[in-house]
Amino acid sequence: MLKVFGRQKQSRAFKEYYFEWFNTLKKNLLPLLRRSIAGESPTILSSHVEMLHQHFQSYYHALDAAATTDPTQLLSQDWRNSLEKPLLWLADLHPFLFTNLVRSFLHQQYRPETDQNNPRRHLPLPFPDRPWQVALAWSNSSDSLTACMDQIECRLRHIVTTLSDRLKCAESAFMECVVGNWFQCWEEQNIAAAKEAVGADVKAHMEEVVSVVLYANRVRRSVLVDIMSATTVYQAALFLEGLAQFLIGFREQDLLNAVEQCKVLPHAKHSRTSSH
């Protein structure tokens, strides 16, 4: 059991990788993408879009390697803050977050003021300070893009349920095996057999956890590829900018402080009410 759970050095290594990956995203790739969005070269923009896309893909490949080497480091991610943890599903971002972000752009798409039947006709043009190709990137989104999101989400609903159920079943089976094997060996006062049996149970459980996490990562990578394939270069640029800014924003200290303050205020209000 010690061999399975005692890999602190590798856990720290992946934590360091994550922060290095995050800093590259924040300080290098996102500013580079924004400069190319404001520029006039579709070729350069396309190149920078693909760079950022591959940055996300490389992260999930690294997550695969970490899960294969030591899955326990992904079960308790101490580098995640209180805003990030609710967004996690099987070691990283829930894949529905990707499609929901696309839909947020689709719902905010601009409609001409001449469209009298559109209640959003008086809303300002999105991204007014950017080139018109970018400002209007989502204004004429095809029905095929919406249909693509529908198909992805339909597939996700099935996969998410299946993988979540697999993990629950694995945890339940693990508890049954550990308790049963341990007590049987304990009654026989055979400590060596207990260690061997429980160690085998832990190994089997971790193998199933790894299998589930790897499948979840394949799903995340696949959803990103599907979105990139279904969008134009300008839509893809805004999508990746939004995704990057979403991750960065959830690590901003001001936002964290504001959320923590909101948690405290209702409690303080309740305490004052109770005292009266």
Image (spheres, rainbow, N blue to C red):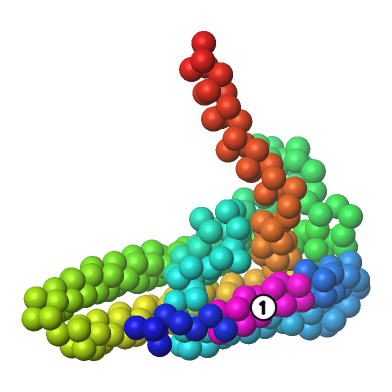
- Helix, strand or loop at label 1? It is helix
**For the point 51% across and 15% down, which residue is it?**
275
User: How far from the left and from the top, in percent, is residue 75?
Assistant: 45, 70
User: From where the camera sits, is residue 50 visible?
Assistant: yes
* 24 part of magenta stretch: yes
**For the point 79% across and 79% down, which residue is it?**
48
User: From where the camera sits, is residue 219 visible?
Assistant: no
The residue under label 1 is 16
User: How far from the left and from the top, in percent, is residue 168?
Assistant: 29, 67
**Which region of the structure is painted magenta?**
10-25
Check disc 1: other Cα within 10 Å, few if <14, some if 14-19, many if 20+. Answer: few
Which quarter of the image is occupied by the N terminus?
bottom left
Q: Amino acid at mark 1?
A: Glu
**For the point 78% across and 51% down, which residue is it?**
126
- Asked which quadrant contains residue 51, the reply is bottom right
State the residue in front, 135 or 271: 271
* 105 part of magenta stretch: no
State the residue in front, 61 or 101: 61
User: How far from the left and from the top, in percent, is residue 233?
Assistant: 73, 74
Residue 172 left/right relative to 8: left
**For the point 88% across and 77% down, which residue is it?**
41
Is 78 drawn above or below residue 112 in the view shown? below
Residue 71 left/right relative to 167: right
